[in-house]
Every structure is written in structure tokens, then in C-alpha cells.
Image (cartoon, rainbow, N blue to C red):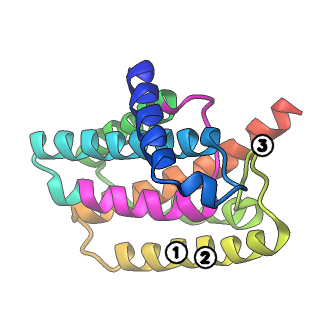
Amino acid sequence: MYNMIQKVAKSLARFIESTGFIKENPEITIEMVVFGCNILISTFLGWAIVLILSLKWGVFLEGIIFIISFSLIRYFAGGFHAKHGEVCTSIYIGIFIATTFLSKNMESLWVLELLTGCMFIPFCHFAPVGTAKNKVPLLKERAKKRKSIISVILLFLIFSLLPAGSTYKKYGLLAILWCELMVVMGVLQKVVRQ
């Protein structure tokens, strides 16, 4: 699947190059455009698979809540990064499958709320987490830190106010918890690679 995504990304990049966009913007290279197209395709593929699975399992709105919550926090906070897009997409789909399993088998929500609240402390300390190649500049880091903390607080408050048995609440809180874990895993990943 990775080769197929790469081929489509290269085709899209060549099309963008043919429009003159890269010539007009000398700071942008064809490799950067291929990389961006690759990420875009992988992201849309992950979203599509999650939506298809959520439709099949009868949790479509929960799937949308998961996608929005997870994507919003990950955008600002960063975290664990796989070396290849297909691994990242596979992990994302695996997290959604785990979320669906956990939400169907979870009796007590207070444990989830407690875990999510406790993980917020290291999340606030470490977010945002960039990569070795893509370090977050200090000013952007401060802005992203504020945005990631605000997004987690707002989403946590919204989902905490939902009724106790609500599957929306479970999917939303699990999405937050996964993102918090991904930030901690991202820090561990940086430590191991150094």
C-alpha cells in the first residue's frame, strides 16, 4: 500500500509542479510537495477507513467525534511519530478499533475520566512534541502548547458533561487519552533515539 500512496503522491506533486507553484516559491522543493501529498493521502485514507468501520459497526457519529477530537489534539500537540505513513495510518486505525472495543466493554467511566485527568499533567509539561527533523520553533511551541492545552480542556469539559452512559463521552475521552499517551510516547521516542 505504501508504494501506491507514494505513486499517487508523486503524481500529485508533478501536477502541482506543472502549475508553476514550485517555481513561484523557490523555498519549496518537489520533495517537500511529495512529502506533504503523502501525509495528506495517508491522513484521508485513515479517516476514510475509520468512517467505513464506524458505519459498519453502527457508531458513525462516535467515529466522527473520534476523528475530530484525535486530529485536533494531535495537530497541536504532536507526539509519537512513525517512520512511514502506512505505519502511522495502521496505528491510527488500531487506536480506533481499540477505542471501539473499550467503549463497548467499559462499565465504569470514572476510571477513564481519572486516567485522562492524570495524563493531562505530563501532557501539559511535554506538549507539543516535534520530531528530530521537524523541531517546533520556540514561539510556535508556546502557541501550540496553549492551543493543545485549551483544546484538551475544552474537549474534556464537553465530554465530561455528557450523560454517564453516553458512547459519545467514551469515544471523546478515549481520543483525548490516546493523544495524551501519544505525547508521552513521543517524548520517550526522542529520548531513545538520542
Mark 2 vs mark 3: give the one in front.
3
User: Of helix, strand and loop, which one carries label 1?
Assistant: helix
Q: Is residue 150 left or right of residue 102?
A: right
Question: Mark 2–mark 1 contact, CB under 8 Å?
Answer: yes
- The image quadrant that residue 126 belongs to is bottom right
Task: From the image, state whether disc 3 or disc 1 is nearer to you.
Answer: 3
Name the residue rendered at 38%, 20% in the picture.
Answer: 1
Q: Which residue does the image show at 45% across and 58% down from the upper left?
A: 71
Q: Nearer the viewer, residue 181 or 118?
A: 181
Looking at marks 3 and 1 on the same chain, the residue that comes earlier in the sequence is marked by: 3
Amino acid type indicated by mark 2: Lys
Residue that badge 2 annotates: 147
Residue 151, disc: 1
* Helix, strand or loop status at disc 3: loop
On the rendered structure, is 31 left or right of 62? right
Position above or below: 102 against 129: above
Q: Which residues are magenta?
A: 63-85
How far apart, in angstroms, are the residues tagged by discs 3 and 1?
A: 25 Å
> Would residue 78 be counted in the magenta stretch?
yes
Rendered image: mark on residue 133: 3
Nearer to me, 109 or 135: 135
Q: CA distance from mark 2 to mark 3?
A: 22 Å
Q: Residues within 10 Å of mark 3 (few under 14, many from 20)?
A: few
Is there any visible trace of residue 84 in the rendered image? Answer: yes
Q: Is residue 91 visible?
A: no
Nearer to us in this view, 4 or 129:
4
Q: Earlier in the sequence, mark 2 or mark 3?
A: 3
Q: What's the residue type where badge 3 is placed?
A: Lys
Q: Position of residue 91 (x, y in %)?
A: 46, 34
Residue 46 appears at what percent x and percent y? 35, 41
Please tell me whether the stretch drawn in magenta is mainly helix, strand or loop: helix
